[in-house]
Image: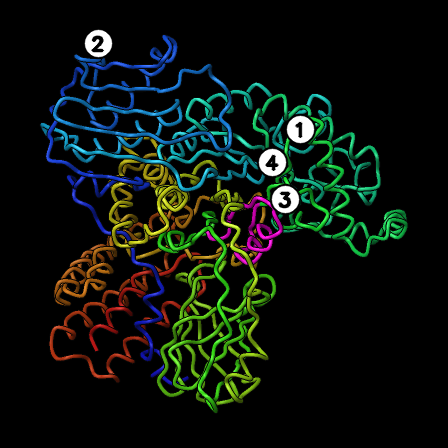
Amino acid sequence: MNLAIFTIGLLVSILALPIHAAAMPAEISPAASLMPQPKSMTVTTAQLKLGDNIKWASLGLSAQQQQALTLKLTKQLSSALQRPVQLTQVAKDQAQLQITQQTSQAHRPVKLGDDESYTLNINQQQIQISAANELGVNHGLSTLSQWLYPQRNLMAIQGVQIEDAPRYPWRGLLIDSARHFMPIDTIKRQIDGMASAKLNVLHWHLTDDQGWRFESKHYPKLTQLAADGEFYNQQQLQEIVAYAAARGIRVVPEMDVPGHASAIAVAYPELMSQPGPYEMERHWGVFEPILDPTNPDVYQFVDKLVAELAAIFPDPYLHIGGDEVPPTQWLNNPNIVAFMHDNDFEDGEDLHAYFNQRISKILAKHQRKMMGWDEVFHPQLPKDTLVQSWRGMDSLAKITAAGHPGLLSTGFYIDQPQYSSYHYRNELTPRTPFAMPKFAPQQQAQYWQLTIPRLKGSAVSVGLLIAADSPSAYVRLNDKFSRQVSVSQQGTNVALTLDTWMGPVAFELDLADHQNATGFAFIGNSYYPVSGQLTAEKDANQLAQDKLHLAPATHPLSLTNTLGGEATIWAELITANNIDVRIWPRLYVIAERFWSAKDQTDEAAMYQRLADMEHYGAEVIGLQHQAQQQAGWQALLGEKSTPADAQPLHILAQALEPAHYYTRHHINYQRDLYHQQAPLDHFVDYLAVESLPLIAIEQQLQQADAPLKQALAAMEQLLLQWQANQQPLLTLIAEHPRLGDINEVANQMSQVTDIGLRLTRQCQHPPLSSPQADAIDMQLLQLLQQQEPHVIAAAHTLRRLVSYCR
């Protein structure tokens, strides 16, 4: 492949790799630290002195609410100010802190659409929080806590006026307790984090092929035979519901039917579409066991379970899963096939729709509304069914256009390591269809059919339409609608980027053969080869008509039907020991997308605030992302290790990231480690998604007025630190066999530092020649081509520097 391809459009392609977060000073502007950003905020010149004994008053709160609020305030203010604080209740004219609840009402379950607005005003005399109800008060206190934290060492607090309310009423996090069990304390800690981020729905995935996690009095064999002793009894479920409600969070349980039912099959095989026998499923994936929709006992089973769940979870919604329903067992059962024929069902989708209609009636009997994934969508689906989309914006657009309320989860799958900037760009409302492009008469275009092979599952199909002398290209991935993207072309070399359900994808292609394409794509930070063929070349307008698959021109946006979104933390590669590392602080970014205005899109400012939330979440809220990383790496060194012993691992981690997208899942699959019993206690299991120490360099390169020499100096300092760490790191690895899986990457760091130091020094003289730049870029690319659970993220930053140094 022509080396020039690695330079042509390089800046465009690497810019698709999101900017990392910048390191934050200990004291920063409180206005720059809030996340989510408020609807309206005005920083004033007022200064309020706030001591350790804070006088406070409340209006509109019952005596019981005042007592509970005193405890909450004492804890929150002490945590935010990082010192013990005492509260004394006084008359409102003597108070430094006044909280007003405008409507006094008895405690009731949190409901979708409740008023969550609040105001926060800090002047020279007083902090004032006003809201319609407890929800708004809670949000106001969360904002106050974030406002105080960066000022914790100051003598006076900066004044501000904030009016705030959420953009979307449904802002959730799905926690998967089925694949790997999550203890009660782990769930509570995530709820605390959710409340601090102003999220309001815990979607609790309680059943799947690998485990049934809630106690049923009617069907005890579910936990006796299909839970490995790890499940929540009904009292614990009620405890979580109450804990979440006190923090303004609804809990929506998910019981997955009719598929993802291997656990049911183990306990009650008589309910399945094939007789079995069945054993506990330990591997990850999609499996055949599925409930029999023609068996009346199945509906009695669901009815009794729904009754038990409804008695515990007060929320009107109950999630029935409904995703990934393989019809194999149905189509191999003569009785079910006959039933389909008798009812004029054409396929498994029609039978699935019949099942869902029956389930919807059962839910209605218990005053519950049905919620399910994309696959429940069908013309016969009751219109009040809430459909949650994991398939993407195209699917969500069809769902909401058909009149169903919808939620978006595509682009918010945080079990995948993905950049925060990618999540931040992920808008929740269906995209406006773009019109068929109009090219100049006689303008020629090419259509390339490309393939991205994956390590597990089918390859990704890519259709690429490129017109001569056009700044835009048109891309279609698999069966999605075509997308218009910017393209960089020089001769037969092409670079383009776009956000996809897999993450940000940056293509660098060589079309020099004219018939065959070669090149690669980075899905997030992970390298994937790309190949393909030229399938058509003719008039651009005609080719666009033939090849582009556009969303219908009449496609409505249905903005009112999009209720919000949910981040998801599926647990194939997540345990209670590293769940915080994967969720926090990234979830604050997604929470901002759900809460704040659509035009809140400044990624550099977002990353500055996110860096502060890294410490705020740990020090104020008690999230364990930092502690879990430290404990995980110390465990690799043995029981007697100290934090100082693990310091070489922390320095190494500055240069690394876990492989993005599902790359590590697929690597584990190839290595026969894609199952429930595979150990998840390796170095990479505690590695942060984004490499924070590379941040300042990345952001400096994005600032047009910042001298390149500043970024070079910062990069050189980092490289020298890695160079000095090399021998202690290799010694540590040699002494501890459990670090063997990072031995190769540790050795490669010598190459990284050598390349990087040579680059930073050469770049300070006249610009690199093309041959010099190509040679360095090829070395870096070779480091990135290796498909391992971790990626040398520093190589991406150095590639970006190569582009700037030319």
Residue identifier under label 1: 223
Q: If you read the primary sequence from the N terminus, does the residue marked by circle 4 or circle 1 appear first?
A: 1
Cβ–Cβ below 8 Å for labels 4 and 1? Answer: no
- Near-viewer residue (792 or 594): 594
Give residue 91's mark.
2
Mark 2 to mark 4 CA distance (whole Å): 47 Å
Q: Local crowd at mark 1 within 10 Å, few (<14), some, or many (≥20)? A: many
Q: Secondary structure at mark 2?
A: loop
**Whole-number angstrom distance, CA of label 2 to CA of label 1:** 54 Å
Q: Which residue is mark 3?
A: 282
Residue 274 screen position, x and y as percent = 82, 45
Residue at the far bottom: name it.
442
> Against 602, is 208 above or below?
above
Which quadrant, please, contains the N terminus?
bottom left
The residue mark sitting in front, 2 or 4, is 2
Q: Is residue 379 visible?
A: yes
Q: Which residue type carries mark 3?
A: Arg
- Label ID, residue 254: 4
Q: Which residues are magenta?
A: 388-411
Whichever of callouts 2 and 4 sits on the residue coming sooner in the sequence is 2
Q: CA distance from mark 3 to mark 1?
A: 16 Å
**Image point (47%, 44%), residue name:** 567
* Image x and y of residue 667, in percent: 51, 58
Amino acid type at mark 1: Thr
- Seen in the picture, residue 296 relative to 697 is either above or below; the reply is above
- Please name which of the two marks, 3 or 1, marks the residue nearer to the observer: 1
Comparing labels 2 and 3, the label whose residue is closer to the camera: 2
The kind of secondary structure element at disc 4 is: strand
Query: Of callouts 2 and 3, which one flags the residue occurring earlier in the amino acid sequence?
Result: 2
Q: Quadrant of residue 256?
A: top right
Q: Name the residue at 25% across, 84% down.
A: 770
